[in-house]
Image: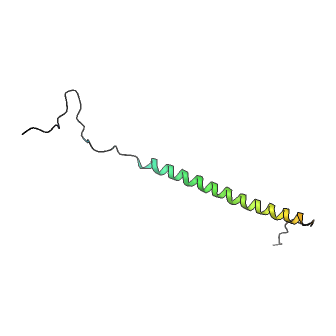
Amino acid sequence: MSKPESRSKPGEEPNPRPNRQPERQSGGDRRGAIAGLIIAVVILGVGWWLARDLTAASKMQDCLMSGRSNCNVIEPAR
């Protein structure tokens, strides 16, 4: 019977864990996900603000184009 080729050659260090991948830090993957989530929330917030602002400007233009002169928004007294 022949011996398996498990011995290392002279000058090489034996590898104690030949088939294992190096352990990763768990914070690296989560940090990218959190950054992506923050960016998505900022983009959604800017989009919501922009939509409200453009809607208000459109209503003002519609009012002015109809020939009215009192298009300012009147807020009720509290």
Is 27 situated left or right of 50 in this image? left
Name the side, left or right, on which 72 lies relative to 12: right
User: Residue lying furthest top in this view?
Assistant: 11
Q: Quadrant of residue 52?
A: bottom right
Residue at position x 52%, y 53% in the image:
34
Quadrant where the N terminus is found in the figure: top left
Above or below residue 73? Residue 28 is above
Q: Is residue 67 above or below residue 20?
A: below
Percent position of residue 44, x then y: 64, 58
Q: Position of residue 41 (x, y in %)?
A: 60, 57
Q: Residue at x 29, y 45 (%)?
A: 20
Q: Residue furthest front?
A: 1
The mark tally for this picture is 0
Is the image coloured rainbow, by chain, by secondary structure, or in one colour?
rainbow
Q: Measuring from the top left, give residue 4's x and y in whole percent.
A: 14, 39
Q: Quadrant of the C terminus?
A: bottom right
Q: Which of the pair 54/30 is nearer the observer?
A: 54
Front position in the image: 43 or 31? 43
Q: In which quadrant of the rendered view does residue 63 lie? A: bottom right
Q: Residue at x 50, y 52 (%)?
A: 33
Which residue is farthest left? 1
Residue at 50% x, 49% y: name it: 32
